[in-house]
Amino acid sequence: MKIIVPATSANLGAGFDSIGLAVNLYLTIEVLEKAEAWRIDHDLGVNIPTDEKNLLLTTLSAVLAQKKQHLSAKYHLKMSSDIPLARGLGSSSSVIVAGIELANQLAQLGLSDEEKLALACQIEGHPDNVAPALYGNLVIASSATKEVRAIKAKLPQCKLLAFVPDKELKTVASRQVLPETLSYAQAVAASAVANVLVASLLSGDLVTAGQMMKEDLFHEKYRSALVPELAAFREIGQTYGAYGTYLSGAGPTLMMLAPEEKITLLLQHLSEKNWQGCFYELEIDSKGLQVEKSLL
Ligand SMILES: Nc1ncnc2c1ncn2[C@@H]1O[C@H](COP(=O)(O)OP(=O)(O)O)[C@@H](O)[C@H]1O
Ligand SMILES: N[C@@H](CCOP(=O)(O)O)C(=O)O
């Protein structure tokens, strides 16, 4: 059995903790054979555990505990991923979604998508990565009310150009620079910008969506000091024809939405900056979580 989960790019500026996109970088988990102890083969570096301390298996354990279920066996697993770690492309969320599905499959839980999303939000704390990782495409979601609500949509036609810095930025660290509270007036203004962002995305108006991305009042201005490339990335995008630019997730990845015919020119000017990192031309993943040779 194989579980495949896409990377995700969250926030889209003003959609902080609520809007996210699934993109074509993937985490894959293969269940190999039963074993005396959990063992994960991977080439993701020494900081990623190869035993039950791995986020994949702590997630599995949490789900089984909540469902009052247990497994009669442990397994040898293979984990592969082309999702850059701690770069703002949802690597942790993809693992959480994979861990929920692994529990679902091995314990035959029969979880609905809604149940998987609710469990993922409990673990992650916000839906903007786990929802598109589960469903694919563009998802606008809220876990602020009793029920997690997620609206699936298609991103209007455009190309995605990401700059992924060499340096890591852990989400926990990036969230620490955010304010504890906003004033009533700030909250009303920030949510109004987010509302127009959503409306423009759903009506196919990427020009207005791009404007709203840079008018975010929730998080980017507090995080800009952690991602020095943001201002220049945004200026190049605006000057050479991108629809919009935003800090992908908690950063440091920067994402640009642009017409296909502008990508070459944008890449040319961005490359002249000689920043330490890589550019990725990404596509939307439209499938989300996939299981091959499901056990259910
Ligand atoms: N494939 C993986 N296996 C186990 N843990 C992972 C994996 N990918 C990410 N993680 C955990 O998630 C952390 C990165 O999560 P986070 O700081 O939220 O960054 P991001 O979600 O932007 O990649 C990693 O440091 C690691 O602890
Ligand atoms: N809304 C979150 C998104 C975190 O995304 P990640 O890809 O950096 O894990 C935030 O902005 O903190």
Image (tube, helix red, strand yellow):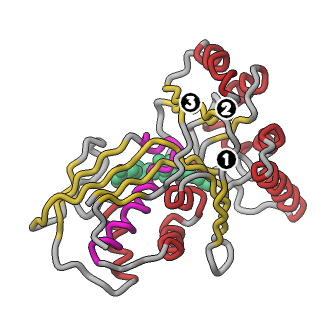
Classified by dominant secondary structure, the portion drawn in magenta counts as helix
Q: Nearer the viewer, residue 145 or 168?
A: 145
Q: Is residue 219 magenta?
A: no
The residue shown at (44%, 58%) is: 289
Q: Residues within 10 Å of mark 2 (few under 14, many from 20)?
A: many
Inter-mark Cα distance, 1 to 2: 22 Å
What separation in Å lies between label 3 and label 1 (alpha carbons)? 20 Å
- Give the foreground label among 3 and 1: 1
Left or right of 60? Residue 245 is right
Foreground disc of the pair 1, 2:
1
Return the mark for residue 163. Answer: 3
Type of amino acid under label 2: Leu
Amino acid found under the numbered disc labelled 1: Leu
Q: Which mark is residue 155?
A: 1
Amino acid type at circle 3 is Phe
Q: Provide residue 178's location: percent of width, then percent of height.
A: 67, 53
Q: Secondary structure at mark 3?
A: strand
- Given residues 72 and 283, the one toward you in this image is 283
Inspect this view and state whether residue 173 appears: no
Mark 1 in CB contact with mark 2 (< 8 angstroms): no
* Residue position marked by numbered label 2 in the rendering: 230
Q: Quadrant of the N terminus?
A: bottom left
**Which element is circle 2 on?**
helix
